[in-house]
Image (cartoon, helix red, strand yellow):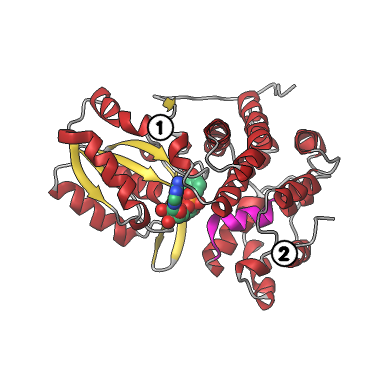
Amino acid sequence: SHFTPDFVIQYAGLRVRFGAGMRNRIAEEVERLGHARALVLSTPEQADAARHVAETLGPRSAGVFAGAVMHTPVAVTQTALAHAETVGADCLVAIGGGSTIGLGKAIALRSGLDQIVVPTTYAGSEATPILGQTENGIKTTLIDPATQPEIVLYDPELVATLPVPLTVSSALNAMAHAAEGLYAQNRNPLSSLMAEEGLRAFADALERVVANPGDLDARSETLYGAWLCGTVLGQVGMALHHKLCHTLGGSFDLPHAQTHAVILPHAIGFNAGAAADELAVVGAIFGDDHPGRALYRFAERIGAPLSLRALGLAEADLDRAAEIATAKPYWNPRPVTRADIRALLQAAWEGRAPA
Ligand code: NAD
């Protein structure tokens, strides 16, 4: 049972819709919010998808801003905010992954504009009130209810275009939210249920997606998993895994989803003994007594990157990475020491299975 005797759960204004072709029904949702001019946000790479959305919005479109980039730089947010004012936007439609969704959240934080989010990766930002931003090369993270999107629309046909390598990394990124949510100090019965079901959805559908990236039923199930895992991220605190990925992404510029993919088996392996009861479900779902090894084997089966070396990190940077990652203390089921983290990073750099 996931029951814990003391907990708080708070939901406000949650509206989530799933369905193939949902991207063609955004106008209904703009109308439902009582708005008339939606600015559509995307990365330059997804500008075509954004223009398609703007067309379906017809007179409810305030055009497209296709300038979202990684790490949500404040300078880009300010340009987009000025653009939103110029075109008289009264709400935002973000179509894309965590980078585009981050831009929408950053604009909403500063303007109060409502957000409709149409996710195209599994990262899960749409389900959280969390925003990471960078200014002068420094990434900071804040939690503010003003960043939480009002409406989320999941369309499996959109995620079907996510290339297989990014699909598998992004899925492991999502699964990391659930895996760490299982042992979070402030977990609650629902967050644990969602974490377990989210992991199960990926275990069930991801290999089918890899075999046939256009399989819409499997894509739907993975999106369902992503929503559950993202919801967990938005509700409970994260620990070692997310700290390590934040360090590697922030200080060494490693790619977000791929870094999560490599670190996950090692971070969960590290905590396996200290959170044995909470993590038992991971081993059960992925078919190995040891939850870290279970995730490593799963990552291997789906063709995920397995080493930090493959992501371009130099072995000479591992000392500094261990130092930065342990500079500020934080809660983790197993106490974190610099020497242990250095050893973990070595194994992850080499791509060895977790011990
Ligand atoms: P991303 O948004 O940076 O997307 C990577 C690339 O893939 C982009 O070029 C994008 O346009 C493209 N792409 C996305 N979906 C596609 C699709 N279906 N088809 C083709 N191309 C597609 O990657 P991400 O991993 O989704 O997001 C990473 C960012 O999100 C990081 O900055 C991370 O910090 C942030 N994030 C934030 C939260 C939060 O709660 N605040 C949660 C998770 C991630």
Q: Residue at x 37, y 56 (%)?
A: 45
Task: List the single residue furthest toward the bottom.
Answer: 316
Classify residue 257 as left or right of residue 102: right
Q: Secondary structure at mark 2?
A: helix
Residue 247 at x, y = what percent? 58, 62
**Whole-percent x and y of residue 280?**
80, 35
Amino acid, disc 2:
Leu
Residue 245 screen position, x and y as percent: 60, 57
Q: Compared with residue 244, is residue 232 higher up or lower down, i.e. above or below?
A: above
From the image, state whether disc 1 or disc 2 is nearer to you.
1
Circle 1 residue:
152
Magenta: main secondary structure equals helix
Stretch of the chain drawn in magenta: 254-264
On the question of residue 50 being in view, the answer is yes
The image's mark for residue 285 is: none
Q: For residue 222, what is the image quadrant? A: top right
Can residue 110 be seen here? The reply is: no
Labels 1 and 2: the sequence-earlier one = 1
| Residue type highlighted by circle 1 | Val
Q: Which residue is mark 2?
A: 345
Quadrant holding the N terminus? top right
Residue at position x 20%, y 30% in the image = 35
| Badge 1 element | strand
- Residue at point 40% right, 37% down? 148
Badge 2 local density, few (<14 within 10 Å), some, or many (20+)? Answer: many
> CB atoms at circles 1 and 2 under 8 Å apart?
no
Quarter of the image with the C terminus in it: bottom right
Q: Residues within 10 Å of mark 1 (few under 14, many from 20)?
A: many
